[in-house]
Structure formats: structure tokens, C-alpha cells
Image (spheres, rainbow, N blue to C red):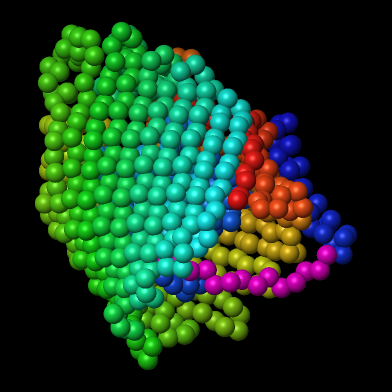
Amino acid sequence: MKKKAHTFLFLCFLCLCLPLSARAEGVDQPEIVKLETIIVTADRLPQPMAKSTSSVTLITEEEISEKHPTLPDEILRGMPGLSVNSSGTMGETISIRLRGGNSDQTLVLIDGMKVNSPWNGTYGEWRNTDLTDIGRIEIIKGTQSELYGSEAMGGVVHLLTKEGGKTPGFTLSVGGGTFKTWKESLQVTGGEESLHYLLSTVRIDSKGQFDNDAYRNTGLTARIDWEPHQTFSLKSVSRYRSAEKELAVNPDEFFFLDPNEHQSTFFRDKEGVRINHSFLQSLIIEGEPCPWWHYRLNMGILRDHYRSEKMLYYNSTNLMINDVISNRLVLGTQHDFSRPDLPNTLTFGLEYEQEAAAGGMELGGDPNTIVKSILGMDTSLFFDTIDKKRHNLSLFFQNRFEAHPLILTAGLRWDNNSVYGKVCSPRFSGAFTLDKTKTRFKASWAKGFRAPAFQELYFAAPLFGNPDLNPERNTSFETGFEQQLLHNLSIGCTYFHIGFEDLIAKWPPPSRNIGAAVTKGAEGELVYHPFSKLDFQVYYTYLDSEDKEKKCELSNRPHHTWKIAANYHEGNFSVHPVVHIVSSESYSGPGLDLQGNPTKERNPGFTRTDVSFQYEFPNRYFKRSRWQWYARINNLFDEDYYEVQGFPVPGIHFLTGVKGIF
């Protein structure tokens, strides 16, 4: 009760104290002037955010810079339609879901390059993706397979790197915090009129909250932008990440069952470790041979190496080792045709993708004796390595009609895969604006799919993998409105309904297409600028889900999610508090917790408060540089909760440091 009282007082502070103090000071309340925000993800071409027919949430470079998140979950959590599940401390697994879909039904892009793992379909690198080099994040909710193909069933999260500058400069940041955490970063920018570059490096070290919980992460980024002429440009982005995480908590599930209890269980792992190495290279060439034709050529290479070593609960002298290398090559072209005297923009695209995965799982010690003693099966069924490839050829088309106050889009994508065959993905969307009331209505209908991952197809087949799997499919519909009530107040609400078919069930094995589910709900947001120094955001998501096979709600999908945030600036100082309120959710997982007690069927809800600060030292102290102090405090009131049962979330913890801009 004490923590809830703290949170209630904190909310009162957000909603009352700051506006009252502003009025007491007699601060003027000028009209908030909004500049046109350009987004690139929704229709695969730059356009004002206010003209998008999709549901879009944008996280700007300024917001990332001021709130100083160490990892993406700290700034993505609570955004409309998006849910985050973090398995405890820094470096543990982070799952991002859109509108109730699975994490492998959310497509993640970095500078237009797909980075979901070919091995399991998810973007497991959320846990290692720092935002030091990220300029902004675009979140496109709703099925987007019409333009992006597989994994875009729930939507797209697109991370775009920062651009370099015309003049040389560099930024140095050093910070430290709880659990003996240190973070250092260096960025160098420069160039000339037609050539810009950015070089970035970051290092994160943390001792962790428990024994064998340390985390180390090294990142390198190089970006080059070359525009020799206004009708031609080239962009090259290279990113390398190397991370190592000690696994303090181990969910010993799968087929490794406690021979006495016959239940899977969580336990403390004294030797477990996970190692990730990833490399991403993207190259984009754009040009305009004539005013009505814009073309884009893109090439991308992804290489991901994942290795984990975990103790076995029933035999701590043996390790379970997973070692997989996956690769992706993408070659594509896109052509946009438009004329000023016509309301249509036609987009055609062709894309070729090749994926490969090699590796598998093995047991140290004498696995044959262990497995036979528990399951009575030969180990060759489990530990055969795989080395597979597949390729995909896709064509996509979209027509965008824009004649104020109406915008309509219609598109179709055709995928032909060497493993699962052909898939067609249509989408229709529209928006209509009432100028007098400043009301904007929008709606869309689409079909999407997710290709089965290599792990689902081939791992230990036929016992676990199934080469005959079909893609997962869905049909989605959404409708909503945006309303500018006053010059400083706007609201929006969207209803969505998604039906999933041919969902891939992995347990009991083997993998098979039997699943069907429905998710539906509403997303609401309110943005209020009571005066120029202060703004509030309130985001709310209601989600109702049902597993059609089991006649129950889907696990890890809370019904209610709130995010209440404020941004206050006073001179060189700014403060950014945020309160997250998440309702209880159904849970399925290992049967026993760390204390040997049965895990709960529902994960209790929680209320969490975070706050970040920034202060820029006056210029009179530094002639040729700018210096900032920053601090971020997470879980301010030391809430005790789980986002994933068995993995306790850290109590109050912070990171503070200084940043110099030269």
C-alpha cells in the first residue's frame, strides 16, 4: 500500500503541481506550433506523418537524447499497442509484441534492413541494442506484409541511425550506476557539403544483481552519406555488436524434466552464459532520373552468431550447448512514379532474399546416458546439427491516391519461397480529414503471414521440427480517429481486430499448424501542452485475446496498459517522469519457481515509475564545447514484480553520467 500511495502522490504531482506553478509564475501559453514530421516506413516512401493511413508512433532523436535509455525497452515500454516483457536484469531476453501478436510476428528493421533472426524468427538482439547511434524509432502498428512480407503480421518497428554532420565534431559520454554498471560511448561526425559520416562506439559493463549475472556489450557503427547531386545519393551503414551475458536464472524446460518432480523448474545457474555476435551491412542508392520517377536500390547482409551454455538441473556436471550461425542476404529495388498534376503515386518493387542457418544443440558429459535414463530415447534424435538454406523472391505494388481531404492506398505483395511456396498479401487503407473540426478518420484492412523459422522446420526433425509447416496467417482490420481539440490538446483512438490462422504450435512436439487466435482492442492517446515548458502524454491500450484451440486468453497479454508521462524544461534543466500501469495477465511456463513452489496461473499486475534528468552547464564555463549531466532512475519506488515469471525485475536502480559535445 505504501508503494501505491507513493505512485498516487507522484501522479498528482504530474497532473497538478507543474501546471499550477506555471500559472503562478504568469507564464504565457503561446500556441504550440508543430512542424511537419516526415516518416519513411508506413508506405516505404517519405511522407508527412499527418498524411499516413497507418497507425504510427514516432520516437524522436530529441526524446531518446533527453531520456537516456540504456536499452530500447526503457523507452518503448507502454507505447500504444506495444507490450514489453523483460526477463529481469540487463542483458536478459526482451520481447516486443504489437497488438497481441507474438514477438516473432513483429518485424524489426534497422535502416530498412530486416534483422529478425532466420533461426527463430524473433529479434533477440533487443537485449543488446543500445540506442547511442539511433536517431529515431518509427512504430507502424497493424499488418504490413503487403510491403514488408514475413513477420510483419503485427506491425513494424524501424530503427534509423543518426546522420553525420557537415562540420567535424565528437561526443563523449561516461556514466555509471547500480550493480557496478558502466557505460561509455564516443561518436565522431564530420564531412563536407556532399559527404557526411558518423562513427560510433559504445561499451556497457554490469556486474548484475545476482551471482553469475554479469553483462558486457560492445558496439561499433559506421555510417556514410554521399550526395554528389540532388538527384543521386548513397548511404552505407555498418553495425557490429558483441555481447556476453552470464545466466543467473535458468528455466530448465523443454524435454529436460526433473526426474523426481516430473516438472520443469527455474533454478540458479552457476555456469550458464550466452554469447552473441552480430554484423549488419546495408547499402542504399537512391536517385531521380526525372521529376516523376524516383528509384531505390538496396543491399543488405546480416550475420548472427548465437551460443549459450546452460547447466542441467538434474545433472549439474553437464552443460546444454546451443550454437547457431544464421545469415541473410537481401537485394531489392523500388520505383515510385508520381506527377504533380496527378493525385496518384505508384510504387513497384522487387526483392530477393536468401537465408541460411547452421548449427544445433549438444550436451557435454555423457548425454546418451542422461537422455536415455529420462526419456528412453537415443540422443541422435536431439543433437543432429542442421545446415539449411532457402530463398525468397517477392514482387510488391502499391497505389496511393491523394486528393484532399481523401487519401486511399491499395497494395499487393506476392512471395514465392523455395520451402513453403507462394503467399499473396493484400492491403487497403484510407484516411479522411474534416478541416472545420480538425478531425481525421482512418481505416485499413490487410492480410499477413509469417514464414516458419529454421528452428521450427528442421531442429531435431521429425521429433521437434517439421519440414512440412505452412506459414502462419492473419487478417486484420482497424479504424480510428485523431482530433485536435485545442491549439495545445490532441487525442486519438483506434480499434483493431486481428484473426490468426495456422499458428505454429511447438508443444507437445513436433511443430505443427493447428493454432488459431483472435486479438482485439483499442489504443488511445492524449497529448497536452499546458504551456511551452511542459507537456503531458497519456497512452492507453486495451487488449482482449483468445486462444481458439484452448478456449482461453493468450499468455503474457495484459488487458490494460497505461503510460503517463511528462516533460518539463526550465532553462538548462529538464525532467522526464513516467508511470507505467500494467494489469494482470495469464501465464504459462515452467511449473516451479526458484523456491520450488508452483508458478502462478496469472502474473500479477504492477505499477512502475521511472524518471530521467538532464542539466546542461552554462556556456560561459566552456568556450568550445557543451557539457551535460544526466541521470535516469528506473523503478523509483522499488516495486517488486515480474514481467516474466521466474525472472525478478531489479528494484530501484539508476545510471548517471556526463556528456561532452565538442
From where the camera sits, is residue 505 visible? no
Q: Which residue is drawn at 68% across and 63% down?
A: 528
Which sits in the foreground, 405 or 328?
328
- Residue depicted at x 44% and y 16%: 268
Looking at the picture, how far across and down is residue 460, in whole percent? 16, 29
Residue depicted at x 61% and y 50%: 661
Residue drawn 28% across the image and 19% down it: 320
Question: Does residue 28 belong to the magenta stretch?
Answer: yes
Considering depth in this image, is 332 or 374 the residue closer to the camera? 332
Q: What stretch is highlighted in magenta?
A: 27-41
Is 351 rendered above or below residue 576? below
Q: Quadrant of residue 295?
A: bottom left
Reply yes or no: does residue 528 show up in magenta: no
Q: Position of residue 630 (x, y in %)?
A: 66, 42
Residue 402 in sight: yes
Classify the position of the N terminus by image quarter: top right
Q: Which residue is more in the foreground, 226 or 130? A: 226
Left or right placement of residue 419 versus residue 374 in this view: left
Considering only vertical position in the picture, is 493 above or below 348? above
